[in-house]
Each structure stands twice: as structure tokens, then as C-alpha cells.
Amino acid sequence: MIAAASPDAQALAVLKSVWGYDQFRGVQGEIVRAATQGENALVLMPTGGGKSLCYQLPSLLRPGVGVVVSPLIALMKDQVDALRLSGVRAAYLNSTLSLQGVREVEAALVAGELDLLYVAPERLLTARMLELLEQADIALFAVDEAHCVSQWGHDFRPEYQGLGVLPARFPGIPRLALTATADERTRADIVRVLELENAQLFVSSFDRPNIQYRIQQKGAGKAGPKSELLDFIRAEHPGEAGIVYCLSRRSVEETAEWLGAQGLTALPYHAGLPVRERDSAQERFIREEGVIVVATVAFGMGIDKPNVRFVAHLDLPKSMEGYYQETGRAGRDSLPSTAWMTYGLADVVNVRRMLAQSEAPENVKRVEAAKLDALLAYCETASCRRQVLLNYFGENLPQPCGNCDTCLNPPQTFDATRPAQMALSAAIRTGNRFGAAHLTDVLLGNATERIRGLGHHQLPTFGVGKAVPERSWRNIVRQLVALGYLTTDAAGHGSLIASAKARPLLRGEETLWLREDMLTPQTAKKNRRDRSVAPAGAAGGLFEALRALRLKLSREQEVPPYVIFHDATLREMAERRPDSLAVLGSIAGVGTRKLAQYGEVFLEVLRGDVAPAEAAGTRKNDALLSILNRRAESEAGPSAGLPEGRLFGGSGMLASHPDVADRLRAVRQQLAKVKGVSAFLIFPNATLDLLAERQPQSVNGLRGLPGLGEKRIEAYGEQIIAAIRSADHP
């Protein structure tokens, strides 16, 4: 806990020290102030808008531990890794821990030795967990992904409704509910369950200006959807991380296999795969560069990877909330990213049929139908997509964004009243029993064997649309289905049925304007340089060298690369080329702890001790090993008793010193028992490995090592040095 004499100044000081930022974004500062003062809050903030900081920072400013309720193991581990690397005492309780690990974290909780604890709602609601929390000093409760409380939310989880126990069991403890998407019904449920009637409501802008929204009609080119996706990735995001969403498990596996055969690193992810395979895909996506995950909606919620450069949909999502949440996983670092979708008539028919076949209550189906209508209207709009998207969430964007396909390549519209009447009439006269292909044959006057067999060549509508190309009829029918003039049958036969909405149009009481005959793909190759994450020229080579160094360090410390520094931070380093720790520390994302831990090794590259091309190219491993070894030797000093040879092995992992490591591990375990705390709170495994490698011979030699602050050195320093010396002289 950090005492705060001047709350706002103290909050900014901690923001800079821990996270490396000089100021808050948007309403973050107001939320932090309210939570620090003990107020409840309901926070609506877009994915990538910085929600986690809104509960993490107040947990450091208030006495006690901040308890974060999260449904996602991946998010827990990701955030705890990042917090620990920044010097925050964070832990999680979930099914990945051993029984001993659970006991250690529980002991640390009760002893007041944690700043933040992440826990799943199911575990939090157990009698044991509630009793432990009553013994602890709680700073606040943060309910992340709070839309899961509501059956109207797009990801309802029944166990979340049990969180209503918090106000009664822990009165006076501030509660924060946070979500990226929540309509009025969902907000009302969150307020009711968590008793937030008097809470402040903070609504951040839902705009993600760095994301370019694009929709391409399936079949607009000669290739199929997968080939169109491949062209998009190769042209705009080669070697970059992305997520591809598909509707079915089969499509996920086929698409991942096909992309892999084209030379991309593409991994499947869906609920039907073995747990080990899913976990492996997720782990590689988080820890490696340039991995693409092809998934159903089972993937992505809670993934904190900031440098996802694109999110692609090969099938239509089910709602605007789902679309916004999924596309929001791109560009969390605020650098240019793309939300790309390919969309066609079959998608519209399929989602409408699925909704019609749903066994949900009628009131739920009506709500879902309205959400689907909003999404289809977004897909078919001829105006700025961002304006339509933000308007759905109650936000007004006065001017077109200039960064979506309809702004970059405005589509044409035409008066489609007469052809729409023809299509609707054809559906009615054929008995509302046939699909788009059959209706198109009737309109074009194609006397196929089936048409003649059914006698449809004798209908008044047969051939009335000969003047309209077949491709245009497909476009018209798709938009009529999307806009609700044609609907689908619940039986799943693909029949198109004229709805009640069609009557005024058929009677000539309204005019209908539609888009010209295709959703025009935006060819963004010419914009690739402007939208690139890496700087141009020499700075681009330096950026790649910094990425290579970051990747090596992340592998050695077994954390995701972005936990060390975000791409945006590396980009600013490459552009500004700081030549001192003071200047490097002024870069956004470089906190006090990270500056001490990584500053000199990054300055080695920035100062030009290693040429950018060398560090980023085929000789990068040798070059980076040289930097790391010189840095380690310099810090350790001549009196540190370092072993001969390199401190870092060529394999990219720390060299092994089992005798020293075993003695340090034994001392750590003994200290943990004496103090009654978790072993990792004495010092983490990464620190143990580093101690075993460097083998400092004095307490002063411990200073500056990650995971050993002054308090820990004062408390445990002599025992650590004694363990190291005893290994040298058993």
C-alpha cells in the first residue's frame, strides 16, 4: 500500500513509476480518484482503453489488497506477469495452481502481502474463499467483464449473478464493475446485481480511431474467402499477429490448415479441441511474434496482447456487441490495425435461420433479432461505418472518420424500389418456398428444368428482371434479407419469405435506396507504409533490433514480449534514440522498475553498439548475447565472483548452476516458512535464476537485480549471500 498525501499527485507518481506514463487517458483519472476515495463505479470503456489500470492503481493507493473478479485464466496470468515485472505484489487463484500453490497465495492474502489478487467468480463464491476474504484487508472489489452478469449480455455467465453477495458480506468496500460493451438492459442488470444504484457511471468514448473497419463482399473477386483473406494478410500484415473468426469448428480447422499450407503460422482454437492443444495455441499466440489464431468466439476474451494487428471475420458475427468486442482485440496499443470482414448472402440467411431455430424464449429472440438487424444495417450502410457503430452505442461522431472502407472508397446508391418489388413479388408468387438462386432464375427468365417442372416459367414475374445482371440480383436479394424485407424459414430449408415489412414497399408507399452491386473492397496496399507499426528508414531497422532484443529477454524470463515493452514504446525509442537512462525513462511505457531492469541493455542497441541490421538479422542471437553478457558483467563487477565464460547460454536460456540454485531455493523455502508467506514473495523464480548466474558475493551486489527491492535486500540479503557462498565452499 502506498500512502497518499496528495491523492492526485500520488496517483500520477505511481502511474509513472509502475506503468511509465505521465498522464491518464480519457476518464481514467476520474475513475482512479473515485475508487481511491472509496466510491463505487460502473465503468464502460472500450477494449484497449485501459480498464485494468482503473482498478490496479487504486489497489496500490488504498490500504489492503484489490480483489479482481475475472472469468479468464489467460487474463489473470497475463496481468499478474506484467504486474510482477513492474514490482507489484500480484497473484491469482485458479485451477492452474497446485494445492501447495493455492495455500501459498491464500497465506499471502491473509498476511497482507499482496497488492492485487485475481480470482474466478466460482472460486470467490465458495465458503472458504469468502471466509479468507473476511480475514483480509480488502482495498476494493473489481468485477471485470461485468456484462457477464446479464442474460442480455453477449457472454452471459450464470455464476456472475452470485456476485450479489459482495455488498452484503463486505459493506463499505468499494465495488467497480467494468465492461467494454453493455446496452441499457445489461447496465440495469449490472446495477441491480452488484447494488450500484448510487454508483458513478463513467462512459469513455467507444471510438477506436486506430482501427480501420472494412467489409468485403464474398465473391467480389475471383478467389474464395480464404484466398481473399490470404491476399489481405500478405498485402497489409505480413509477419504480424492476428485473429481470424469463423462460425463453425470445421471452418476453423480447415482455414487454419489452409493458411498453414500457404506458409503462415496459423493455429486453430475452438471448444472442441483438447485442452492441451487449446492452451498451446493460446500460449504461442501470446508469447511469439506473428502468430495467427483461427477461432470461434471461444477465443479472445481476456487476451491482453496489445499488438494484434488485425481481426478478420470469415463469417458474420451474431450482434454489434460481439463484433465490437471481437474487433476491439486489434490494436490495443493504439497503433494502426484493421478489422476486416468478408460477407455475403449465405451469411445473412444462416444467421437469420439460426435465430429462427433458437429455442430461446420469444422475448429473448426479439432482442437478439433487433441486435442482428443493427449489425446487418452496419454491414450494408453506404455512410461512415464508424458513425454507425458509435451511434449504436449511443455516441455521436459529428464527421465521417476517414478511416473505414466507405469513407476511403464511398459506395454509390441507387433507387431500388422497382427491382425490390420484382424480387418480393417473385418470392410471393413462388409460394415463399424457394431460395435466392431459384428466385434469381425466375427473375432472369432462366427456363431451367426445375423452373419448367414447377411451372414457374408461366408466372407473371418470370423474366421481368432480364435487364438486371445476375450479380446485381444477388446484391439486391442480399440487402432485402439484411434489411428484413425478406426473411428465412425456421425449418432451415433456405426459403426466402416476404415479410410484413415488405407490404408498404410492394404497394408503392415507400422508396428504397440500396448500395450499388457490391461491397467494394478497399485496396490498402498503397496505404501500407502510412499504416505500418514500424517506423520508416533507419528507425525501422532499429525498431526490429529492439523487437529482437525484447523477444530474447521475454523467452529468458518466460513472459510475453509485450509485458517487457509494448510496440508503441519500442517505436518511440527507435524514433527518439535516447542516449541516457534519463531520456529513456521519459518515454511512455518505461516505468521506474523497467528502466532499472532493462534500461542499459536497450541503450546498448539504441547507442549503436550493435548495428540494427545485425541485431535484427541472422546474427542477432550472437549480437544480443554479447550485449546481455557485457551488461551482466558490468553490473556484477570484478568482486562478484563470477564464473568464467558467458553468463547467458547460446540457447537463449540462462546457463545452469544447479548447486547454487538448489541452495537458494532451500533458503527461500525456509524463509517462507518462518515468515508464513508464499515462497515467490521472498523472491520469484526469475530472480533465483539470475542470482544463480551472477552469484554476487556481497549484499551491495544484490542491488539493481529484478525482484529484489531495498526492503527484501534488508530482510533477506545476508541469507541469500550466505547461500551463494556456501555453494562455493560446501
Image (spheres, rainbow, N blue to C red):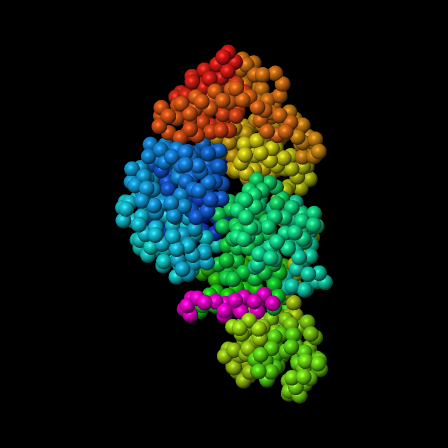
Image x and y of residue 274, in percent? 54, 48
Q: Is residue 406 left or right of residue 150?
A: right
Q: Is residue 470 above or below residue 67?
A: below
The number of discs equals 0
Q: Is residue 307 visible?
A: no
Q: Quadrant of residue 187?
A: bottom left
**Residue 543 part of the magenta segment:** no
Q: Quadrant of residue 170?
A: top left
Residue range highlighted in magenta: 346-364
Q: Is residue 602 visible?
A: yes
Instruction: Identify the residue at image location x=62%, y=21%.
Output: 646
Instruction: Identify the residue at image location x=65%, y=74%.
Output: 437
Q: What is the chief secondary structure element of the magenta stretch?
A: helix
Instruction: Identify the residue at image location x=71%, y=80%.
Output: 448
703 and 509: which one is in front? 703
Q: Quadrant of the N terminus?
A: top left
Q: Quadrant of residue 135?
A: top left
**Residue 352 part of the magenta segment:** yes
Image x and y of residue 592, in percent? 48, 31
Instruction: Identify the residue at image location x=59%, y=50%.
Output: 268
Q: Is residue 556 above or below residue 691?
A: below
Image x and y of residue 439, in percent? 63, 78
Q: Is residue 408 above or below residue 425?
A: above
Q: Is residue 210 above or below residue 570?
A: below
Image x and y of residue 114, in percent? 38, 34
Q: Is residue 557 left or right of residue 651?
A: left
489 and 730: which one is in front? 730
